[in-house]
Amino acid sequence: MKIIPLQPHYQYRLWGGDRLKRFGFRFNDVSIGEAWTASALPQGSSIVSAGPYAGTPLGELYDTHRELFGIDASVFPLLIKWIDPNDDLSIQVHPDDELAQSLEQQPYGKNECWYILEAPKDGEIIYGHTFESKEALQQALESGDVMTGLIRRPVSQGDFLYVPAGTVHALTKDVSVLEIQQSSDTTYRLYDYGRTELATGEMRDLHVNQGTSAAFAPHLDYSEPVLQLDHFRTRLTRNPYFFVEKWTIEREESVSTDTFRLLSVIEGILEIDGSSFGMGATLLLPANQSFHLSGTAVCLVTGVSSPTKQKARIGIDLGGTNTRIAVVSTDGRVEKQYKLKTQPDLELATLLNQIALAVERFGLEYDLTHVGIVAPGPLDLKRGAFLTPPNLPNWHHQAIVEPLRTLLRLPVTLENDANAAALAEAKFGAGRHVDSVFYVTVSTGIGGGFVHKQNLISGAHGSAGEVGNMIIRKDGPTHPTLNVGALETHASGTALQKRAQHKGMTDSMTLLSDETERNTFVDDLATGLANIIHTVDPDVIVLGGGVTASAPLYWNQLQDAVAMRVYPHLRGATPLVLQQLYGDAGVIGAAFLA
């Protein structure tokens, strides 16, 4: 028998019950909250249940038969739990490897992930917080006000979340999960609703100081796109510690392993090498083996990530509201990212330190070669500093490139956000097949960028493409930094929203449903686009930004209006196309700045 089935270890929990039985588990105790189906921890080891190694604890099997695993970690690195909360879990956070080794003398921190097995109709979990600093978080914990600043995220069956060490989090009542994590049970409990242990009548310990030290503050919100590997395998995460794949078995499949895999059946019946396993089963598939799978089943499969680092770039999109720090592959794909509130009312150093933390985490997995950062203009690109961006008022004239380069010890380049989006669309998006691309973003403001033969044209003072300040009328609202009659003051999302509010409408889309207002918007935007065509004569104009979500309302009319405003021989020669990279254009372009 090549496969090695594992017998779970059941853990009592204050918030447990007996509902894990509906996932195929069998036990007699009450208040069982967790089934550890793959564990080498001494306080709850899984046991081989059949075959030549029957009766052997997983940790002992790893120590004595390393050839089954194909890795050389000093201790077995992974842990799988099935968790069924009969009540809300405590608010908690886990340390990373460095902190676990220094504070707990443990080899691993606790990066983990959840696959949602069941959730009520209005199910939610706690994932992150809104406190702007570690000091604010600790003060809220000590005063008992932490619940007011926690972020609740809706979840439903089949959702998947990666929970990096440092993320303040909690499962809630009736949200059942399969948890895959590093082999660690180190948890810093921050808040516990004042509950007491039934056996002692005493409240459980809290770990406010350690937890505050471990926590992201401000919160870093992690996301990673799902990747379809083939017709039956989907990768849910790949991080420095483990990968997780979802296998949907509907016909006969053959798989091979290089290093070991842990396979958990979460739906149906799996047939593997002539044996049947139902929901709740966890199997060890040894290294360097081939297996034949059939039946009808859904499985989660995990193993350790390859130690080989892929080359990648970092793109940072610093907006007035949010900042994104993304890993971008050499072929222009966003691999994963952290997002945080920009909070321009705080010191710039607060943001830079969080950026450095995120980049440091990504550096554990990738060979990072360059960091590009984009921000709202105007910017001093030669000095690597802000000038007077309207939505970053407290950071005017502050340098950002040199402080970030010092923190990251990597090359850092600064550019206008619209220019970076233009570069991304020219290299990887709607303009990748032509030489000359002008990108216009119609969003909170209006910006632009010009790319010729995949080279960004920034201008002598870094202001090329700043079409938002182009004068299209003699009249218009006043603005602190823009001309009267500027395109941005008439056709941006902000301008539309102000007009909508003045007319008692809810949003800009409703405004553009009004024929008179739509005509005004189209006339203004078309005038700006015609000016661009006459000035630089691009192969294509790519339109992006939030206002393009309403494009079906005005697109054909806009094309006609532009055609009426250009020389006859140019009519139809410069197509207007919608962006293809959408919200990723800024970080992708940032990553590829020279």
Image (cartoon, rainbow, N blue to C red):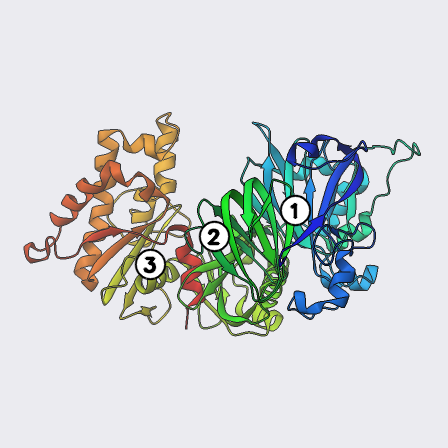
Crowding near the residue tagged with mark 3, few <14, some 14–19, many ≥20 C-alpha atoms within 10 Å:
many
Q: Please state which of the two labelled residues, at mark 3 or mark 1, is closer to the viewer.
A: 1
Q: Is residue 118 above or below residue 72?
A: above
Tell me the element at label 3. Answer: loop
Residue for point 36% across, 54% down: 581
**Decide: marks 1, 2 in contact (CB < 8 A)?**
no
User: How far across and how far down the image is residue 309, in percent?
Assistant: 55, 71
427 or 244, nearer to the observer = 244
Left or right relative to 478: residue 206: right
Query: Label 1 sits on what residue type?
Result: Glu
Residue for point 39% across, 41% down: 494
Crowding near the residue tagged with mark 1, few <14, some 14–19, many ≥20 C-alpha atoms within 10 Å:
many
User: How far across and how far down the image is residue 488, in percent?
Assistant: 33, 47
Q: Give the CA distance from mark 1 to mark 2.
A: 19 Å
Query: Label 2 sits on what residue type?
Result: Arg
Asked if residue 342 shows in the view, the reply is no
Q: Please state which of the two labelled residues, at mark 1 or mark 2, is closer to the viewer.
A: 2
Left or right relative to 328: residue 285: right
Which residue lies most toward the left here?
568
The residue carrying mark 1 is 179
The residue carrying mark 2 is 233
Query: Label 3 sits on what residue type?
Result: Glu
249 or 508, nearer to the observer = 249
User: How far across and how far down the image is residue 448, in percent?
Assistant: 32, 57
Q: Please state which of the two labelled residues, at mark 3 or mark 2, is closer to the viewer.
A: 2
User: How far across and how far down the image is residue 93, in percent?
Assistant: 72, 48
Task: Tell me which numbered mark, 3 or 2, is placed earlier along the sequence.
Answer: 2
Label of residue 466 in the image: 3
Left or right relative to 327: residue 276: right
Picture quadrant where residue 51 is located: bottom right
Tell me the element at label 1. Answer: strand
